[in-house]
Structures are given as C-alpha cells and as structure tokens.
Amino acid sequence: MTTAAAVYDPQLPGGPSAVAATARQVTKAYGSGETRVTALDAVDVDIQRGRFTAIMGPSGSGKSTLMHCLAGLDTVSSGRIWIGDTEITGLRDKQLTRLRRDKIGFIFQAFNLLPTLNALENITLPMDIAGRRPDQAWLDQVVETVGLAGRLKHRPTQLSGGQQQRVAVARALAARPEIIFGDEPTGNLDSRAGAEVLTFLRRSVDELGQTMVMVTHDPVAAGYADRVLFLADGVIVDEMHAPTADSVLERMRRFDGKRTS
Amino acid sequence: MLLRTSLRSFFAHKGRMALSLIAVVLSVAFVSGTLVFSNTATSTFSKLFAATASDISVQPPKPADDEEPQAGDKPATVPAPLAQQVASVPGVKTAIGQVMVGNAILVNPATNKLVGPTSGAPTLVGNWTDTPRNPVKITSGHVPQNSGELVLDADTAKKAGLGIGDKVRVDNATGQHPYTIAGIATFTTTNPGAALAFLDTATAQQVLLGEQAYTSVEAFGDGSRSNDRLKADTLAELGSRYQVKTAAEQKADNTKAIGSGLDFMKYAMLGFAGISLIVGGFLIINTFSMLVAQRTREIGLLRAIGGSRRQVNGSVLVEALILGVLGSTLGVAVGLGVAVGLIKLMNAIGMDLKASDLEVGPDVFVAGYAVGILITVVAAWIPARRASRIAPMAALRDHGTPAEARSNLVRTVLGVLLTGGGAGLLVLAGTADRAGTGGQLLGLGLLLTLIGFVVLGPLLATVVIKVLGALLPALFGPSGKLAQRNAMRNPRRTGATAAALMIGLALVIGSSVFSSSAVSSASVQIDRSVGVDYIISGGQAPVTAEMMDAVKRTPGIDHVTTQENLLRTKVQLPGGQNARTDLTAVPASFFGSDFHPTVSSGAMDSIGRGSLGIGETFAEDHGLKVGDRVTVDYGKGRTQTLPVGVVFQKGGLLGDGSFVGLDALAQVVPAAEQPPVWTFFAKAAPGADVGRTLTALQEALQQYPQLTVKDQAGYKELVQSQVNTLLYLIYGLVGLSITVAVLGVVNTLALSVVERTREIGLLRAIGISRRQLRRMIRLESVVIALFGAVLGTGLGLAWGVTAQRVLRDQGLGTLSVPTTTVVVTLVSSVVIGLVAALVPAFRAGRMNVLAAIATD
C-alpha cells in the first residue's frame, strides 16, 4: 500500500489509467464529542481498473461505509475521493447524482428492482433516466451473459431471487459504468444461486473488462475476486491478491483470533 | 393492552392522522356551528317575543281552509269598536288597537332612495301605541301628534342618515304620503332587522288601511287572571269569529315564522356538513387502509402469537375512535367559530344577533360527537375487517410493498349492476312523461350511478389510467412512465382517492349544465314569446296607477300592459271535482304582440273574449280541452263559469298557470277588491331606441325607488344572476368537498412516498435526479386528480343532461352544456394534482438516499 501521507495526484503517470477509484485519507465520523464514532479512519484505497476487488471485514468494520463513500452515496468527514479522474468529494447533489447515473453501477443485497417495471425496463432504467438510447448490441450481449433472454418481459415478482439479482447485475452492466459497486449482492441468495451470480460478476470482469467492487462477509464470495481488502475498526488492516475461499477463511480466522485475544 | 397498542400506534402515525382529522373537524364544525347558530337565533327571538307579546292578542279571523291569503291583498282587519269590547272583558286592564302593515315602503324624498332594509327583512309601518311592553321607546323628539308626523326607529334612521325634522315618504298602493320625522324610537330589545315607522292612529288607519279599523287588538291583563282564562273569557265575549292568542301562543307563532326563515341557512350549512362527511369518509377509509397495509407484518405477528381476529379488528377500531373523539372535540370548538361567523353574516344583513349570547346546548355536543365518532368508526370498519383477515403467515412473508389488491369479481359485478341500473334509471327519467316521476327516477339514478362509480373506481382506475397515462412516457420520459405505473399499482387506493374528487366535480358539472340550461332556456323563451320591451316590477308595495301613467307618458313608450295574480285559485271542473291553479288576469291586448307563447290548441285571443286559457299539463291532468266549461271561484261567493278557449303548450315561459281576461274578472269582482298589480310591462313605440327609452324610463320612475326597470337583455341578466346565486352556494359546497379531496390526494401521496422509501432510495442511487423524482410524484398526483375529474365530468354531464330532460316541460327546454366550465374543471384538476403533490414531492426529494436503501 502507498504511504498514508502521500497525496494522490491523478495526473501523475501510472495513476488514472490503472485506477478506477481512489480514496485518500478518508475519514467518516458520526456524532461529535464523547459520542463521536469513527467509522472510517484515514483510509487510503486504490481500486484497479478492470479488476474484481472485494472488501471484507466483520460487522461494524466500516466496509459498507467505505463503499457508500466511494460510490458517492455518502459524504466523508475529511479526505478526498476520485472516481476515474473526477474528484467526487465536494460535489453537489446534482453532480453526484449525474455521476452515479453515468459512471457507477449498483447491485444491492435486496430490493434492487422496481416492482412496477419488467426485467428489461429495469435493466435500461439508468439509461432511460439519462435520456440515452441503450446500445442494442451491448444490451444483447449483457442479457446473453447473465442468461435472461427468455425472461425480459417478466415483472420482478415473477422472478426468483437469483434471477432478480441477475437482472440487477445486467442493469449495472448495461450502462457501461466505469465501476460497479456490489453491497452483499449474494447475501440473500442460497449457495447455488449465489454462485451463479458471482460467476456472472467474474465473467463481466474477465470478458467485458468491467471494474467491480464488492462488499461481502462471505469468504466464498470473496474467493471470486482478484484482490481482497480486509477492514477492521475503520482501518484497512490487510489485503490479499488472487484469493481463494480457503485462504480468505484462513485469514478471517486469524483476524477473529487476533480480535478476541 | 389493546388500548395501549392502539394509542401508541395512533400517536406514531399522527402526521398521517392529521389529514383525516381535518376532515372530521370540518364536518363536525359545520354540524355544531349550525346548531349553535340556530339555537342562538331562536333563543334571541324567543326572548324578544316573550318581552314584547301582549297577554292576549285578538286578530282577524283565520281565512277559511280553502281560501288562500292573497299576497298584497289589503291587510285583514278587526273593526275599531272591538278594542272597547275587549277592554270590557273582566281582568283586562288595557286593550289597545294596533295597526301594523308590511305593504308600504319608506322613501327619502330628498334622494328618492329607499329607507330601510333592502335584503329581505320587512319594513313595517303602523300606529304609535303606548303599550306596557313596547319594543321601542322614544329617545329623542316626541310621539306622532298629527297627520304630518312620523316616528322612525333609530337603527333605520342612522343607516339612512335621517334625523328629527327630515322628511320621509310612505308609499303604498294608495299613493305617496309625505311626513316629517317627529321622533326617533330605539329598540329596548334585540332589533330583529326590520325597519319600523309609526304614525298617529287616525292617520295610520286612513293611510294604511283606508278604514276605521285595526290589524289587531292587544290586551294586557291586570294580573288577576291567567292568560288562558283571559283568552277563554274573551272568546266568550266576542264569539269565535276572531282569533285570540295568548302570549305563549304568539311567541310560538312568531318563533316558528323566524325559524322557517332561518331554515334555508340551516339546510345549506347541513349540506356543507354532509358533503365534508362523505368526502371525509373516503379520506378516513384510505388512511386506515394504508395503515393496515403497512402493518401487515406486525398484525401477522400479533396473530401468530395468539391475537384473535376480534382483537385485531378492535385495535384498528379503537384507533378510529380516538381519531373520532379528538376530531369531534376540535370540531365542536371550531363550530363555535362558525356560529360566530354566521352571526356576523346575519349582522351584515341587518339581523341584530349578539355573538356574546352564544347558546351552546347539550344537543350541540351530542350531535357533534355522534357525527364525528360515527363517521370515523364506520369508515374504519372496512379496513379493520381487512386487518382481521390477515393470516399469521403474513408475518413470515418477505415484506416490501404490500401486495396489490386485485379487484375482485364481486366488486366488478356489483359495480356494473349499480352503474348499469343507475344509467337505466337516468334514461327512464329523461324520457318520463311527468316531471314528478322523472325527478324521483333522476334522484335514484343519481345515487346509483354515484355508488356504482365509487364501487367500480378501482377497475376504472386500471383502464382509464392506462389510456390517460399512455401519453406520459412519451411526454415526460422515465418520470412519466414510473408515475403512470405507480398510479396503477394500487387501483383500490387510487379509486378511493379519486372518488372523493369525483363527487365534488360531478356536482360542479351537473349543476352548471342545469343552470346554464336554465339561463339559455329562459333566454330562448323570452326571444320566442315575449313581445314587450320592458318589465317593471314593484318591491314590497304594489304598483300604483301613477306609476303606470308615468311609464305611459315616457317618450318612446307605445303602451303598457298589466297582470293581476290570483294564486291557487279554486276552479270547478265539468265533472264536478275541484282543482287549484295560479290564475292571472290580463287585459285583452296581453296575448298577441305583447306575449305570444306557443299554443297547443284553441286561439290565444279567445281570452280577451271571455274565455279561459290553461296550461297543457293542467289540461292533461284534468282531462280538459278547448270548449269545456270551468267554474272559477274568486272567493267571497263570487263565481264565474267560463269556457276553455286556449291551451298553451307546456314548457313555455308562462309555466302551467291559467289566464282570464280582466274584463271577465271585472264582471264579478269589483275593481277595489281585485288583486293589486306587482309587475307590469311596457312596449316601445315602433322606431324608438330601446336603450335610450330605458334610460328615459328610469328617469321617469326616479321617485319610485322600489321599482326596477329591465329591458329584455336586463331581464335575461336578472335570470342569470338569480341562477348564479344558487350556483354560488353549490360552488361553496364544491369548494369544500374539493378541499377535503385535495387533502385525500395529499394523504395518499404522502403515504405512497413513505411506503416506497426503498424504491425511491434505489432510484436516487442509480441516478434519478431530485427534479425527476419530484416530477414523477407530481405526475402521479396529476394522473389521480385527472382520473377523478374525468369520472366526475362524465357523471356530472349525465346528471345535468338528465335533469334538463326531466324538466324540459318546466321551462328547461333548451340544453346547454357549458364547455368552458368543463374545460376549466379538467384544467383545474391538473392544478389540484400539482398542488396536492407539493409537500409529498418535496419530502421525497429530501429523502436521505442511504437511509432509504440501508438493509435492515
């Protein structure tokens, strides 16, 4: 990891091309005085372009907060964040909204889809909102990749949980965002459906060159990633490249052991 | 335990309850305000009458049952010697002959303006008497002492700017009588709004009655006998020819008379209460339905751990009860304000009620609470039943937005039957031969179509919004698409919300079709059958010969024509049976160029030759045809047998009345006993400028301020303004119902926004802007409002057109659909939608994205 004190400049060579999102000295605190709780404590992160990054950590470690800040859903107390070469800290709501619409894709744990729209309408919703026409060839490819071709006219209530998450993945991919954030995207699925969705996420990185960041507490899910960041008490305590479910589980155990000791 | 959960739940949702509360408060306020007002008015007047009534009053004989008192007839009198006769009854201390008439007016000769109230309250002129219970006392000047002096009441004098020494004229059928104000009398009790003027007794008798008589004799006892005893003794002394009334009986009579005057106001106010109750009911049903839907899991849990259906049902009803009690309490308080407002209104039109004398009886609380609690509990009943049907399994199911309620078959069949039946009745009503039957069918059809539309609302919501909303995605992109889908996702809720608006708008459209048809029908009739150019109508006093002469002398006037009305005259038909008809006596020249209504059979000019003219409906009802002989009974034993000479077609301007020639009338009724003229007509000479002649007429009649002169255009405007007066009341009702309906739309939207928190969060996360989000909610609101407006317009048009068909023979022959009103209604429903969405849209825009999407 880079040293905490170094200030990132996206204009420097090797910076923007390889990095899709950057956080520098990001601190997020709630409350003030004695009741002050620090969720993130001077975190530095670089998310590599075209890679699958997982963020792990026990409950309350700040992993969701980190993701929300990186995705422009939450504001930071101090520090700076870039998506691509756009600094998002300090942007107004309007600009942030546009940034989320055009550059970021989301997959949430549950309630990803609007019940009043069918699968296809849900997939194209971000582009509809932006007033852009979807790229038909790309859309077909995405739909093909997630295996939804026969179910595009179905309403979310007519789809299984796994299918619903695949629609959400397709929606995130369809707009070709710079980066996709997943917040426990398989948290509500059984292991088979979860494996299916994770496979699609993996394929979208490998075959479509998508940048993916996923918050999870499931070592199996983290095993699909290229790199795992471990968060504890608002600080990045470790990272692992080319993880497997076993190695992540092993690391988590040590981590728990250290915490309880 | 149950009560505690209900209480907690009530206060947890106090924001949501607030709107329903407003509806309850409004209804209760109108009910209790009306009661407080009429209690106050009645008690004020009973006090007034109790303070001023004589112990016994001897009044002219009551007209026989089959003899109608004729408006403007000379006042009934008792002979002057009766006063002495009454005074001689044992126990009577004094008996005073009183003269008091209502058929004269007061005019300020300096300005030729009317003195006294112009808004319905009477002007009473009489003799000055010194009774022990005089409602007025002289506060300056002195009592009238000769035939040139007059005493005026202080309030009227102040309003007219008159004082002692000023001139006042009394105008009545016998002419103009000038006086000088000698004294000012002030009310010692509440002034009921009338203007009072007093002359000395001899002058009053001569000028007002034309004979040595009184209109009543008021007697005061010496205290030795009860009033009932005095009455019995007086009756024994006088025989039963005269009416004798005790103080209590006079009070009851007078209170009843005032009461019926206030009835109109009372019914209008209760109409307001009724409308806000009905519309408020929808609001309450919706609020509780949504609360129940939101708490599905909670209720399921309650059932899973062993709560009974009855307990669940009860907990919802208890919440409604809390709302009802709270709403009623506030409502009664606001009602007092309404009552004070009404009293101020009455003050403005001259009735002297005091807001400090508010009479709040127990009936106010009983009625207020009964209305408020009943409406909330009844309206909450349906949602409560639905809540009790929630299965324990609901607790375990994945939550999210509550399942969409499918409009079931029963509802559809019922709705179609009601609407179809109602529509059938409307068609029957429109084709019914008789207005009476048609009216009943119309009423029933109106009710059935209304209920049918309310029942069908959810089904119609799906269909109509699909059509209405089809444009939205094209016009407004994704916001439009989402708005359309959202409006359709809970048809039952959309239906109920729109129904509240529908009722108000159906009333607007229905009544405007009716009124616009009335105005254009009158206008068509005037153009078709009226040949005279001017109509001159008197006020409180009849038209005199001098007035007619003044008109005749005006340059540009060719001639005048008059009419004398004999209301509800008894006629004997050829078969021997009796009937009553409003008979108008007209000169021979009346029909022809002056008035030319459409004739069904016979010849119009036969009336001038001693025949009778009758209306078609009257002819049909009694099997009369031209040539039949009818005996007219003019009262006092004067009868005359005349042939029917002409039958006028129904639906004409003259209504269904009968006509007789003045010459024929004069053969049996002496001129002095003929009814006075209240309205007469004038025709401009050929070639005269109608407008300039109107100005000349107005100048010529300047000294008769009670007369109004209208040309045909002016008369049409008058008809319009009379219709408008009714319309304003209806618009008031409608305004209220729309206000409550807007609250309903706000309510529905606010709850939808809360319910869809996570959806809104998701939309914001994936990049919908605040602006797009607000637009989505605004459009949903507009779609709901427009849906209500479309249903309301459809219903209103059906009602209005049917009403016109029903009354086609009663002067509503021409259908006129006010397109402007229809367009304005539809456009304003869009505005209503936008206004209702203001707060919910703002709140949705402000929603914290993170909190909305946070998984729990």
Image: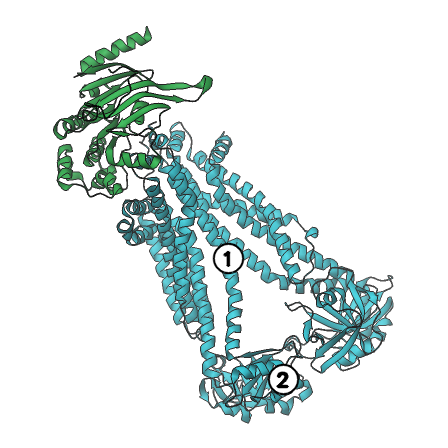
Chain colours: A green, B cyan
- In terms of secondary structure, where does tag 1 sit? helix
Residue type, numbered disc 1: Leu
Whichever of callouts 1 and 2 sits on the residue coming sooner in the sequence is 2
Q: Quadrant of residue B344?
A: bottom right
Which residue in the structure is indicated by mark 1?
Answer: B733
Question: Who's the residue at 70% across and 52% down the image?
Answer: B357
Residue B91 appears at what percent x and percent y? 87, 66
Is residue B672 in view?
Answer: yes
Residue A100 appears at what percent x and percent y? 28, 34
Residue B646 appears at what percent x and percent y? 49, 88
Q: Tell me the crowding category of disc 1: few under 14, some 14 to 19, or many 20 or more residues within 10 angstroms, Cα based.
A: many
- The residue nearer to you, when weighing A25 against B589, is A25
Compared to residue B616, the image places residue A47 above or below, namely above
Picture quarter with the N terminus of chain A: top left
Seen in the image, is A258 located left or right of residue B636? left
Q: Tell me the crowding category of disc 2: few under 14, some 14 to 19, or many 20 or more residues within 10 angstroms, Cα based.
A: some
Which residue in the structure is indicated by mark 2?
Answer: B634
Picture quarter with the C terminus of chain A: top left
Seen in the image, is B787 located left or right of residue B653? left
Question: Who's the residue at 40% across and 33% down the image?
Answer: B299
Chain hosting mark 1: B
